[in-house]
Amino acid sequence: MWMEKLSKGVLELDTPIGPRYVQPNLLQRAYLIWTFRNFFSLPQQVLSQWQLRLIDRLWNGNRFVSLAVAGAADRPVIGRVERRVPLQAEVVPIRKPMSPAQPAVPEQGREAASA
């Protein structure tokens, strides 16, 4: 199986519009097989700077492959890079502390309950 990946494997890139497949050269395929040796799918955040540059070069090189064409479905996928959008942290307004002069719960009049 790894020989097939080395000879004609593609890399799957997760995009907002769906998966895209790029065709790396032989040396890039060998490095990607090593990168994805334990995991089929990796989030972009865990990749090293060198790996991120490689992915960006493949993306910008327009070496996209369509797996929908006849005969292309048998191309093995080396791995999948998840391009997750970083979540925005929720901004919580700063609350002013209560002053000690004002109690949190207003006191009610001290009236004795008549029975």
Image (cartoon, rainbow, N blue to C red):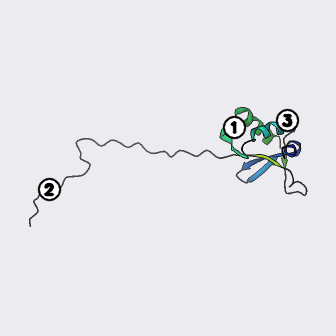
Residue at image mark 1? 47
* Residue identified by numbered label 3: 27
Q: Nearer the viewer, mark 1 or mark 2?
A: 1
> Percent position (x, y) of residue 15?
72, 50
Q: Judging from the image, what secondary structure is the residue with disc 2 in?
A: loop
Q: Position of residue 54 (x, y in %)?
A: 77, 36
**Secondary structure state at the residue bearing disc 3:** helix
**Residue 81 is at least partly visible in this image:** no
Does residue 83 appear left or right of residue 113 in this picture?
right
Name the kind of residue labelled 1 in the image: Leu
For marks 2 and 3 on the same chain, the one whose residue lies earlier in the sequence = 3
State the residue at coordinates (83%, 49%).
Answer: 76
Earlier sequence position, callout 1 versus callout 2: 1
In the displayed structure, 50 sits above or below 82; it is above
Query: Circle 2 is placed at which residue position?
Result: 109
Q: How crowded is mark 3: few (under 14 residues within 10 Å), some or many (20 or more)?
A: few
In screen coordinates, is 89 left or right of 28? left
Looking at the image, is 111 positioned above or below residue 57?
below
Mark 1 lies on a secondary structure that is: loop
